[in-house]
Image (cartoon, rainbow, N blue to C red):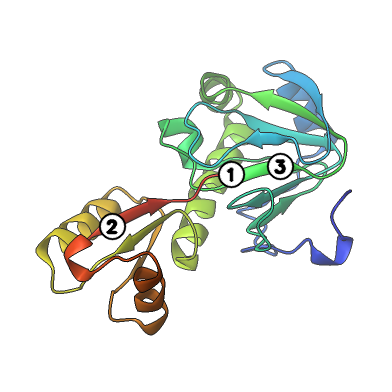
Amino acid sequence: MPENPNSKRGIGADDSVAFPTLSTQEIDILRKYGVETILKDREPLWRPGESDYCVSIILSGGCFVRDSVDSESLIAYHSPGAFTGDVDVMTGRPAPVGGFADGETHILQLSASDVRLVVRVEQDLGGKILIAFIRRRELLLESAAHGLLVIGSGYDPDTQSIREFLGRNRVVHRWRQPEDPETAEIMKAFDLTVEDTPLVLSFAA
């Protein structure tokens, strides 16, 4: 079933730079570069961890962005006129989150190479997409609640190296220390100790 309309609020929902609505004229321009398709309810536009996926312009229906299709945490919601994606689409880096159809959803899909062509040929429209991608990544990094999970002590050199690497490459992640009560409880449940850290975990659908 489609999402409850009152629940369609995600990170930066009111940020018009990160989540602009395309005009009919802009969508018509993009039709020259993409392919249209229709998805069933909850069918993935892309999955967490996927590295070769498309930017999708929502023509009807909607797309909710979550860690998994059954996750209760809504990261973003794309209504008709909106488009999916962030810089990971262009770099080929695995997606930290997934996108799933909200009811029957009609989309226009553009590959990374299609988007690069739009940026070169349709500079105003391409610039809008590019700026939105950059801003979305900033919002996701600021949220620190999605992507990879790093578990390790702040005093551990290996943990520090991993966090520095992820930060330098702007990989969305969150960090938990073994001393945190909640983290310690989970580690104990799985018979893990500090000697087993650092751990790097990825969420997938």
User: Is residue 29 shown left or right of residue 161?
Assistant: right
Image location of residue 62, percent across then percent down: 81, 44
Residue 35 appears anywhere in the view: yes
Q: Could you say whether the residue bearing mark 1 is in a helix, strand or loop? A: loop
Which label's residue is closer to the chain start, 2 or 1? Answer: 2
Who is closer to the viewer here, 183 or 108? 183
Displayed quadrant of residue 175: bottom left
Residue at image mark 2: 199
Residue at image mark 1: 205
Q: Could you say whether the residue bearing mark 2 is in a helix, strand or loop? A: strand
- Looking at the rendered structure, the kind of residue marked 2 is Leu
- Looking at the rendered structure, the kind of residue marked 3 is Phe
Who is closer to the viewer here, 44 or 196? 196
Residue 197 appears anywhere in the view: no
Q: Residue at x 65, y 41 (%)?
A: 84
- Determine whether 95 is above or below 15 in the image: above
Residue at image mark 3: 100
Which label's residue is closer to the chain start, 3 or 1? Answer: 3
Q: Categorize mark 3 by other alpha carbons within 10 Å: few (<14), some (14-19), many (20+).
A: many
Q: Categorize mark 1 by other alpha carbons within 10 Å: few (<14), some (14-19), many (20+).
A: some
Q: Mark 3 and mark 2: span between their CA atoms?
A: 28 Å
Q: Extreme bottom residue here? A: 181
